[in-house]
Amino acid sequence: MFSVYKISGIMSSSTYYGYCVGEDMLESFMKGARRAVDPTIRRGAGDLLRENDSNEDNLTAELVDACTDELEAWCIRNDERSSDIFSITGPSAWPANIAQRASKDHPERVEQWKKNRNINECPSARKAAKLGGFKVSDFKALGEVHGRDIVMKDMDGLNPKQFSEKYDLPINYSIN
């Protein structure tokens, strides 16, 4: 069995998604996090651990899904990574043999991950909306509550994550 998991910490809003064989999700995460002890090397697991005072006790593991097939576990992990603005890592092409199978067997999912990455990396909420990340009706409703001018300024001045956090507005992802 493969466990797809989410790790979050009490000292940051960042999340990390991974998968492992069996059920010991936190142990699997910590193996990767401990390999990333050099703070100059960007590695999602190590970054999340450092954000939480490098203390395993500040982390919680949550089971997202359980699968018998590694390809499905890998795809679910990437679905989650691409559709959570707080995920400290995006979809991964590792291990390469699984990534190749996913490209062949699930090209629509791979395309969705790319779309979600483009939304997440937009410099402004307005640009993310043009890619489908927010709905025009959401902006209109926020304008009625917070004032149109403020929302319009924030649409251009805040990236999607900042905008989502400020207005408690989820980003519109659609995973196939």
Image: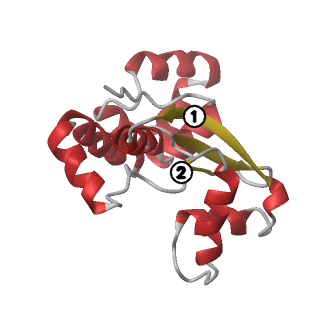
Q: Nearer the viewer, residue 157 or 59?
A: 59
Viewer-side residue, 70 vs 55:
70
Which label belongs to residue 25?
Answer: none
- The amino acid sitting under disc 1 is Val
Task: Write the residue at 57% across / 15% down.
Answer: 144
Residue 36 lies left or right of residue 107; in this view the side is: right
Q: Residue at x 56, y 21 (%)?
A: 142
In this rendering, which labeled residue sits more in front, label 2 or label 1? 2
Q: On the image, numbered disc 1 is attached to which residue?
A: 64
Residue 113 coordinates in the image, percent (x, y): 32, 42
Image-based side of 13 in relation to 54, left or right: left
Q: Residue furthest right?
A: 57
Q: What secondary structure is marked by label 2?
A: strand
Q: Residue at x 62, y 39 (%)?
A: 165
The percent coordinates of residue 101 (x first, y second) are: 21, 48
Q: Which residue carries the number 2 mark? A: 20
How many labels sit on residues?
2
Pointers 2 and 1 in contact (C-beta within 8 Å): no
Whether 57 is drawn above or below 158: the answer is below
N-terminal-most mark, 2 or 1? 2
Secondary structure at badge 1 equals strand
Q: Amino acid at mark 2?
A: Cys
Q: Residues within 10 Å of mark 2 (few under 14, many from 20)?
A: many
Cα separation between marks 2 and 1? 12 Å
* Colour mode of the rendering: secondary structure
Image quarter where the C terminus lies is top left
Is residue 37 placed above or below 63 in the rendered structure? Answer: below
Q: Position of residue 33 (x, y in %)?
A: 63, 68
Residue 61, position as x, y percentages in the image: 70, 45
Q: Count residues near mark 1 (Cα–Cα under 10 Å), then give few for <14, some for 14-19, many for 20+.
A: some
Task: Give the residue displayed 47% in from the left and 23% down from the top.
Answer: 139
